[in-house]
Image: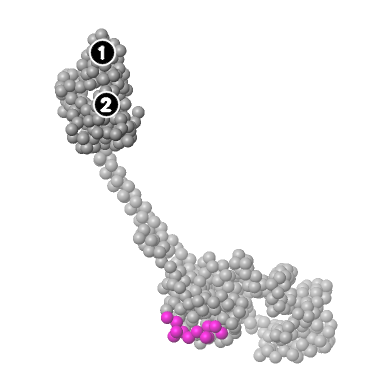
Amino acid sequence: MLVAACFAGCSHAPELDARLCEADSLLHNQHELALMKLNDIQPEALTSKDDQIYHTLLQIQARYKCYEPIDGDSTNIDKVINYYRSHKGAGDKLTRAYLMKGAIMEELELPDSAMHYYKQAEFAAQDDQFNLGYAKLRIAKLYSKHHAYDGRDIEKIEQAVDCFKQKNDTIYQIISLKELGSAYRPTKTDTSIVILQKAISLAEQVKDTAMLLACTNDLAESYYNNSKYRGHNEDKAKALNQIKTIKALKTPAFNEENCYITFAKVYALVGMPDSALKYINLIQFDDIERNPGYLEAKAEIAHAQGDLQDELQQRYQQKKISDSLMADEEKLNIMHVEDSCEKMHDEQLINERNRHNNMLAAIVGAVIMSLIIFALYFYRRAHRYDNLVLELKDQSRNQMTDLSELQHSINELKINDERLKMFISSNMGMMREMIEACYHEPNNRIAENMKRIVKFQDSNKDNWVKLYDYIDMEHNNIMTRTRQNYPNLDDKDLLLLALTTMGFSYIQTAIIMGYSNATSVSVLKQRLAKKMGLDCTLNEYIENNGNMKN
């Protein structure tokens, strides 16, 4: 697992062609320029598969944003989807591919398939707020297109608004708010007006004239609804003011036909049937007679002219068309597709979570098993040491029965380095005090006996030599290295070096070495330094080579 994580951490996304990255950056606001740059790139000239697939995706997106037909790109977008499905880390591009596939299915008039791919885009987007918001917006528009007014469209648009707000994308916030205002208009006109006013305010901030015109037209529709169906007479003037605003804002590229129906309804509502007729006659949409808004405008004009029979006929035709639209069979299909996709996605998440939990349980089990094995190993090891300690205690009790046997056993016992160090460290102070007492109380029998015991002589020489191991541990192996470097030193020389290294005083050293005068030790140390050929004193040699401790 660690090796796999290292490989994953060291991997990086392939470098893409700079021209493709530039075209991608232009897609958001300069669609025509992006498409022109993409058309100048020959796919055969792209060396890597990543660049070729990326170019295909960008070209389909650019053509869609430039309102070119993309219904013939179904096979190409399938290749893009299959490619990015097999490449981890391509979440953004996979989401965009799903969105384009959904758009193609819409153009082919297959709304259920479009819903399927929009849902896949929604799932793939995850934390990508822009693509997530765009997928939700496409789903909402698909519902609105097929007149599925059960609240699903509003819920999706509100979620899209939140996504674009987190992404700080003002343009798509305006688009989403416009759609949300239109969705609320049939049931909550006041809410619709507030939302559209917010959209207009944002459009004014970014100076987007096209969206400002579209939102203002929708706001006029909402004021019209409030006045017509709720009796808010003051909203007639507000609707008329919105129309005046649209006329003042229109640009040479403005397609007035998008607003003619609104103009006709408002002018008829305020009692200006001639102006309403002027705009209703300019409409040239295909199959306009099946547009409920157009029929409503004609009914309003008939009402303003006092032609009750024509008004009733237009109202009847409007209701008939509206009922037929509300009975759209695809509405139920796309709802069913969304529910099925949600259910399958939830099942996948549950299965994924179960797999994750199983893997986690296996890892935890393996760790627990390893800990148990280690615990047993250390327990058995500790148990062996406990048995060894018990055996040593039994031996000690047996040897303590006789002092001579104990002394003989101690001489033969090979004490390990750590025990020797602990023993000497804990008893060294007492030994030095007792040795010091031998000098100050020469006539005391106990002191004399102690002096005889500690005196370095052939019978107990081995006892003192064993201290060398302790000194080596405490002072950087000074005894071993000195014996190797100066083989001409005898036992007394080494003892003098050892006692000086351990910090024994002149008096203590004199007693151990069998001298009655402590000043002799100073002379001996000078002779030893000369014998070793040192350029410094013996104490300086010890300090430089043994990290001398107090």
Is 195 displayed left or right of 489 in the figure?
right
- Residue in the picture at 28% in, 42% down: 378
Secondary structure category for the residue under label 1:
helix
Q: Which residues are magenta?
A: 36-47
Position of the C terminus by quadrant = top left
Q: Rounded to the nearest whole Å, what is the CA distance between mark 1 and mark 2?
A: 26 Å
Specify which label sits upstream in the sequence, 1 or 2: 1
Magenta run includes residue 58: no
Q: Is residue 370 left or right of residue 294?
A: left
Q: Residues within 10 Å of mark 2 (few under 14, many from 20)?
A: some
Residue 222: image location, x then y, percent: 74, 75
Residue 36, percent from left and from top: 56, 85
Crowdedness of circle 1 by 10 Å Cα count: few (<14), some, many (20+)? some
Q: Residue at x 48, y 66 (%)?
A: 346
Q: Is residue 549 visible?
A: yes
Which of the numbered marks, if any, corresponds to residue 525?
A: 2
Q: Amino acid at mark 1?
A: Ala
Label 1 vs label 2, nearer the camera: 2
What is the x, y in percent for residue 194?
73, 68
| SS assignment at label 2 | helix
Q: Is residue 150 visible in the rendered structure shown here?
A: no
Q: Is residue 10 above or below residue 550?
A: below
Q: Is residue 51 left or right of residue 527?
A: right
Q: Amino acid at mark 2?
A: Lys
Q: Nearer the viewer, residue 314 or 64?
A: 64
Q: Position of residue 281 (x, y in %)?
A: 75, 91
Query: What quarter of the picture does the N terminus occupy?
Result: bottom left
Mark 1 highlights which residue?
Answer: 447
